[in-house]
Image (cartoon, rainbow, N blue to C red):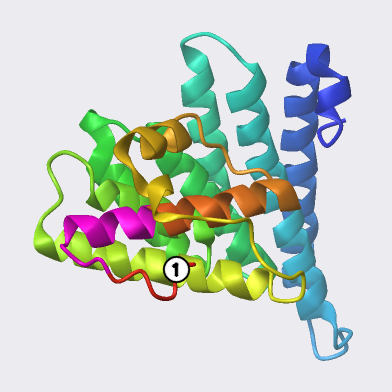
Amino acid sequence: LAINMEANTSRVEEALVACDEAAEASLAERAAGVEERNDDSPQDLHRILDWHASEACGMYVRAGQLTEKYMRGGLAKEMAEGYYKKALDDVPHGGEDVDKLKAVAANNYGSLIWGKERMAEAEAMFRTALELNVDYISALRNLALVLRSPGKGTKNDLEEAQELLGQAVKVTKENFAEEGELDSWSVDDASPTRMKSMKEGWKQEHDRDSERSMASLVRSDLAAVKLELGDEDYAGIE
């Protein structure tokens, strides 16, 4: 139900309950496995425990995403924050899959609270996401945007943003290395008007079309930062 909400938008509250119950069940299974672990435990028990942790983390992340997308009213933002916090605080660290899901939770949480009043907290969440997944393109870009926002924008901030976006461009090229060229891009895409339209309303989706869009965004962002730093060398961006 939680996975197929696009066809069941009237059942969002039921889906959120299902997410909570699934996450709690996975954590209970993991806790039982840890408690019963002994010398006779199967060799792949560690993988099983990590699987339970990733299931729980994934359900909390999904619940946060559903709340952001479908819930309305003053409590919706608070509810979504709660789910992302559960993913970060209640789920034990495990293998790579768990860390990547926690990175999504941190990045989504940072995006949710992004605003003048909570900018420092959002920045911390984006940094947490990158500690968990250094190649997380959305978090790389979000942190770079924070560093270029009002109240920031020092030379050191811009240089860090350039480094972050350079890493994002590198990752996008690697992701599409087997699929041919990325969408066409030109320095005109870095114009202020174009950049504003691309930044507004961005939500990360998990399909190849949106990944291509993100690839174009980070290249344009990188060009814009280079312009701000007085660097007109765009080698490597195209």
Region rendered in magenta: 221-232
Seen in the picture, residue 184 relative to 67 is either above or below; the reply is below
Q: Is residue 90 above or below residue 1?
A: below
State the image coordinates of residue 58 (x, y, percent, origin top left).
70, 50
Nearer to me, 62 or 24:
62
Residue 4 shown left or right of residue 235 in the figure = right
Above or below, comparing residue 206 to residue 92 in the picture: above
Pinpoint residue 23: horizontal percent, then vertical percent.
73, 45
Q: Nearer the viewer, residue 182 or 9?
A: 182
Query: Which residue corresponds to mark 1?
Result: 237
* The magenta stretch spans residue 226: yes
Is disc 1 surrounded by few (<14), some (14 to 19) or many (20+) residues within 10 Å? Answer: some
Quarter occupied by residue 174: bottom right
The amino acid pointed to by label 1 is Ile
Residue depicted at 61% across the width and 34% down the height: 64
Q: Please give left or right for residue 194 compared with residue 60 in the image.
A: left
Q: Quadrant of residue 39?
A: bottom right
Task: Name which residue lies at 86% across and 19% down.
Answer: 8
**Residue in the foreground of this view, choosing between 143 and 84:** 143
